[in-house]
Image (spheres, rainbow, N blue to C red):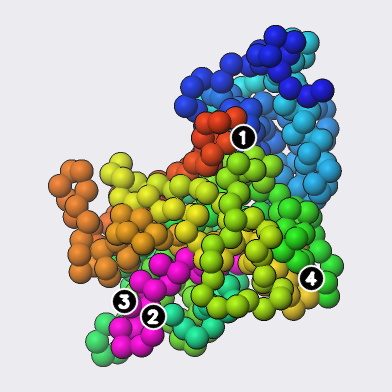
Amino acid sequence: MVGPGPDGVSWFEVPPDTGFGLDNLPYGIFSTPGTSPRTGVAVGDSVLDLDAATGNAIHATGSLNGFMAQGPAGWADLRAQVTEWLSDERHRARVEPHLVDRAAVTLHLPFEVADYVDFYSSKHHAENVGRIFRPDAEALTPNWRHLPIGYSGRAGTVRVSGTPVVRPCGQRRNNGAPTFGPSSRLDIEAEVGFVVGTPSDLGTTVPIGAFAEHVFGVCLVNDWSARDLQAWEYVPLGPFLGKSFLTSISPWVVPLAALEAARMAPPPRDVALLPHLRDHDQPWRLDLTLEVRLNGTLISSPPFAGQYWTAAQQLAHLTSNGAALRTGDLFASGTVSGPQRDQRGSLLELSWNGQEPLTLADGSTRGFLEDGDVVTITATAPGTGGGRISLGEVTGQVLPARS
Ligand code: CA
């Protein structure tokens, strides 16, 4: 029996409101001064050193990929083991020495990113962007309601939270001939990322019902975007250099098992879906609440439950042509925007392309990001323990362009 000790209380006391209780147990890669990066589990204000606690070399590699490749049985076994260790008093003497102060660790990129795909699955976001960029046309393109639109991004520039955001240079056009220089419309996109553990073979598909056999967990994503570069380059093949200079992810990967209480029935859809995207009996809509802060001011609270397409549909779509999955594949939701102004997940939408600047707590205003700005995205979800679990944060500070 896995669970609390005989008195029903875990020996490990989780401080209130950390969001990192025993119903969360996210995985990350950490180091302390003078030691190598290794796998840890965040719990309360601590990190449990899995390399030391398990003695398994798979947790000493500095990447979650080896563990993620084990698949659902291995994930469930370790989660049960860690839960028991932190609950049952009999394990206390052996486990306690392997707990490290979470405030004292350095967090690293949690996994080697194989392929990176970014979707476009919030209807509110897609409609807002359509109205801003194509005011004389239908807000949604004809395909939008029939498939989750996505593009392949640059895996090699996915970095961990805290990585500085050097303002990118590139080609853009205002009026007349294009020029090259620092982006003047640097933006954020608040997104949720899904991390593949179990690979799939080329030529096979991953139906919606097999989602949990392949997806290991969830992280937060900030898809930094240079709108001026993007607007000039994206026709007809989609985003390229306006996105690929940096994508930031949160350091803690929350396992799908921790999100059981966040699962909801899928939302109603506008049109009948083709068979491989039908999900009426597959509750993979997730009730996550995101918060976006700019220099400490809360500027948006995007509701992930409002997404039109679920991650299970995204994965089914992405493999529907037989494309293979690799351990470490990352696919992101696309900007999460709700129907209200204070639920929009990008500055493009929040400031309506700079026309309606935001006012921050210090009285300054923003259309897009200025050098020195710090953007932090956090999220919580209902946990199985009755409270809310945290997905941690993804943050970054804008640095001036390098000339
Ligand atoms: Ca995006």
Q: Which amino acid does label 3 sit on?
A: Ile
Q: Tell me, for residue 132, which label it has, or none.
A: 3
Disc tally is: 4
Label 1 vs label 4: CA separation?
A: 31 Å
Q: Is residue 401 above or below residue 48?
A: below
Q: Which of marks 3 and 4 is nearer the N terminus?
A: 3
Q: Which of marks 2 and 4 is nearer the N terminus?
A: 2
Closer to viewer: mark 2 or mark 3: 2
Q: What residue type is labelled 2?
A: Ala
The location of residue 324, given as percent across then percent down, is 78, 69
The residue that disc 2 covers is: 139
The location of residue 175, given as percent across then percent down, is 24, 87
Q: What stretch is highlighted in magenta?
A: 113-139
Q: Which quadrant would the C terminus be assigned to in this image? A: bottom left
Q: What residue type is labelled 1?
A: Thr
Secondary structure under the numbered disc 4 in the rendered image:
loop
Residue in the image at 19% along x and 52% along y: 359
Secondary structure under the numbered disc 3 in the rendered image:
helix
Q: Is residue 125 magenta?
A: yes
Q: Which amino acid does label 4 sit on?
A: Thr
Secondary structure under the numbered disc 2 in the rendered image:
loop
The residue that disc 4 covers is: 205
Q: Circle 3: is it few (<14), some (14-19), or many (20+) Cα within 10 Å?
A: some
Q: Circle 4: is it few (<14), some (14-19), or many (20+) Cα within 10 Å?
A: many
Residue in the image at 63% along x and 27% along y: 22
The residue that disc 1 covers is: 384
